[in-house]
Image: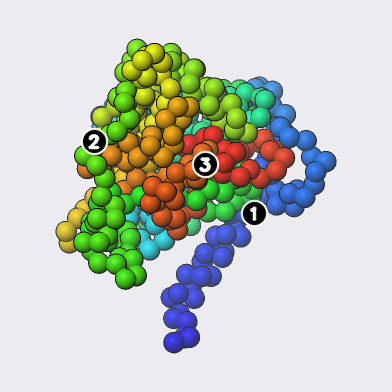
Amino acid sequence: GNEVSIDSLARKVQESLSLAKRHKFWETQPVGQFKDLGDASLPEGPIEPPTPLAEVKQEPYNLPSPYEWTTCDLDSEDMCNEVYVLLTNNYVEDDENMFRFNYSKEFLRWALHPPGYYKSWHIGVRVKTSKKLVAFITGVPAKIRARDTVVVMAEINFLCVHKKLRSKRLAPVMIKEVTRRVHLENIWQAAYTAGVVLPTPVSTCQYWHRSLNPKKLIDVGFSRLGARMTMSRTIKLYKLPDHTITPGFRKMELHDVPAVTRLLRNYLKQFVVAPDFDENDVEHWLLPKEDVVDSFLVESPETHEITDFCSFYTLPSSILGNQNYSTLKAAYSYYNVSTKTPWIQLMNDALIVAKRKDFDVFNALDVMHNETFLKELKFGPGDGKLHYYLYNYRIKHVLRPSELGLVLL
Ligand SMILES: CNCCCN(C)c1ncc(F)c(N2CC(C(=O)NCc3cnc4ccccn34)C2)n1
């Protein structure tokens, strides 16, 4: 009926209150503001100039009295485990609270220890008395090109506040603290993503999902049986060959780093915003690491030239409240390049390898050239939108996803 229950009304009030507070906070920050959207006179580039380092706040921001700052050293097994447990129990869930991201410890160490990382940007909040870790936020340095300008930015990620401490206004002070620590390293721009709308998205992307294990996906409620479809017909629809079909398709190895760097740098040139990877970055971000990142390339059997590349990262989700399964094994499309092998064939080989590695689903954003293969390879549009943001950097127009060459973890 149309009766609105009291608690759903209360939830709506709470949501709109936190949305109002969220915008109030972001209207104080050097980010593109909604009111500026139409103003073509505003130049592209930094919104505010750097602050002289002596004028950057030297001491941490004040936390509410029961809490204290801590720096999380992920090389410490104990600390890495504390971060893993906090995220496993309190990080991003889908709107229906059926799934929660379950980044692994190995993944977190990989994601947070790229070349040139700062330990001081791995920030935790503890309860002073119990020393329990109750919140987390991170930054890693990255060379990002925006049109023709390469800027060293902080990639901000893994903002997580314990479920029991929500709406205590911890997130704004954590964002200000990571910003302060980034400023202390003379870095003045940042990049981040969110499933929620903030001022102002650089681009808004759509997730697409390719079923690999449709029976499990339907059983756990990730997808639904199509109209006029039976389960056996659905399993047949998503069936993949046991082996890849592209001649010369193989796992990337250390000696491939120079060639893959050339291939990827040349490919990423065409996008308005993209990482400016050097060989050290490629070695860290794209060499295969078991249960973290997989990468493959096509080496021409005739010329031994490396002509194509595909990669995906491993990000499982906890399944909340299903009798038969506890984990959804998801692969996320990362960076792909096609110069000789057609996109469809290259990405179909990626699906074949992901299926063979027992992934349940292969996710991809509609960024870069992904829309050229999504529909034909039987990806379906997801309900999750991912908004991309830049801090203290104005891009003249909102970008189409196909103009974006950046994938954050
Ligand atoms: C770049 N830093 C954010 C990345 C975090 N990523 C991967 C993310 N951010 C927002 C999303 F909308 C999203 N989606 C993947 C699609 C999906 O699989 N939706 C069902 C589902 C399964 N498990 C979960 C866990 C949380 C949310 C939705 N879940 C939607 N992914």
* Pointer 3 residue: 367
Question: What is the three-letter code of the residue carrying label 2?
Answer: His
Q: Nearer the viewer, mark 2 or mark 1?
A: 2
Q: Quadrant of residue 189?
A: top right
**Label 3, label 1: how far apart the Cα atoms are:** 30 Å
**Element type at marker 3?**
loop
386 sits to left or right of 300: right
* Pointer 1 residue: 24
**Label 2, label 1: how far apart the Cα atoms are:** 53 Å
Viewport quadrant of the C terminus: top left
The residue carrying pointer 1 sits among few (fewer than 14), some (14 to 19) or many (20 or more) residues within 10 Å by Cα, namely few
Residue 243: which numbered mark, if any?
Answer: 2
Please state the horizontal and vertical placement of residue 167, each as a whole percent of the image. Answer: 48, 57
Q: Which residue does the image show at 57% across and 59% down from the upper left?
A: 19
Please state the horizontal and vertical placement of residue 321, each as a whole percent of the image. Answer: 24, 61
**Element type at marker 2?**
loop
**Element type at marker 1?**
helix
Viewport quadrant of the N terminus: bottom left
Question: What is the three-letter code of the residue carrying label 3?
Answer: Val
Report if the CB atoms under discs 3 and 1 are less than 8 Å apart.
no
**Mark before the other along the chain sequence, 2 or 1:** 1
Question: What is the three-letter code of the residue carrying label 1?
Answer: Lys
Q: Which residue does the image show at 49% across and 24% down from the upper left?
A: 264
